[in-house]
Amino acid sequence: MPHIELAEDLPGIRGLMAFRPETAGPLNALAEVLLRSQNTLSRGERELIGAYVSNLNDCDFCSNVHSAMASHYLSCDIDLVAALKRDMDAAPISDKMKALLAIAGAVQLGGKHVRSEQVDRAKQCGASDEEIHDTVLIAAAFCMFNRYVDGLDTRAPVERQFYSQRASQRALEGYAGYNPLENTQT
C-alpha cells in the first residue's frame, strides 16, 4: 500500500509522476538522455545497467521494467536478463559489459566503492571514458529512481509478463515523451 495517495492504475514511478507532474519532466528528460540518446552503448546495454542496479537495490518495479526493456532492445528472452542479474559472471555478455556492470554494482554500494582496478579492467576490455562515465551516471540515477519508487512504497505488479507486454510500446514512446496527465495506461 503506497505511503501517499497515488492513482491505482499507475504502478511504480508512473504513479509518482502523475502525483507530481512538475518533477516528471526533468526525471524523464534525464532518463531519455541516459537510456536513449546517441551513445556507443546500445539502448539495450544501458537498460541492462539500469535493470542490474535496480535488482541490486531490490526495487522490483524498476528491475522488472528495465529488464523487459533490455530484453526488448537486445532481442533476447527476459529469462536471460534474469539469469544475468543472478550471476553476471556466467552471463553470455561481453567482457566489456561485465566490467561496466561491475562498476555499476560498485556505484550501487556508494560512489567511493568504484576502484581504479575496475575502471582499468573496463578500459582493457574496450570501454571508453564516455561509456564509463555514462555507466556511473546511469547507476547513480537508478539508485535515486529506485529509492523514489520504493521509498513511497508504490505498487508493482509481480508478473514479469506485465512488463514484457508493455516493453515495445515503452520503447516506441521513450521517456521524454511521457506525460502522466495525458497517459493513464501503465
Image: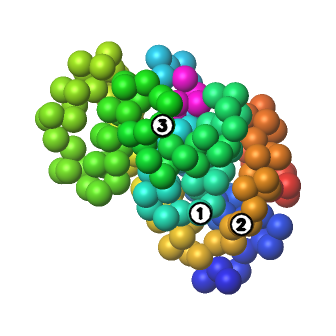
Q: Quadrant of the N terminus?
A: bottom right
Say which amino acid is labelled 1.
Answer: Asp
Q: Position of residue 120 (x, y in %)?
A: 18, 26
Work out whether residue 176 or residue 121 is closer to the camera in this orientation and state it.
121
Residue 91: mark in rendering = 3
Q: Are marks 3 and 2 in contact (CB under 8 Å)?
A: no
Q: Residues within 10 Å of mark 2 (few under 14, many from 20)?
A: few
Farthest residue to the front: give it. Answer: 90
Question: What SS does tag 3 mark?
Answer: loop
Question: What SS does tag 2 mark?
Answer: loop
Say which residue label 2 marks: 158
Say which residue label 1 marks: 60
Q: Quadrant of the C terminus?
A: bottom right
Task: State yes or no: residue 44 in magenta.
Answer: yes
Q: Nearer the viewer, mark 3 or mark 2?
A: 3
Whether residue 30 is visible, yes or no, is no
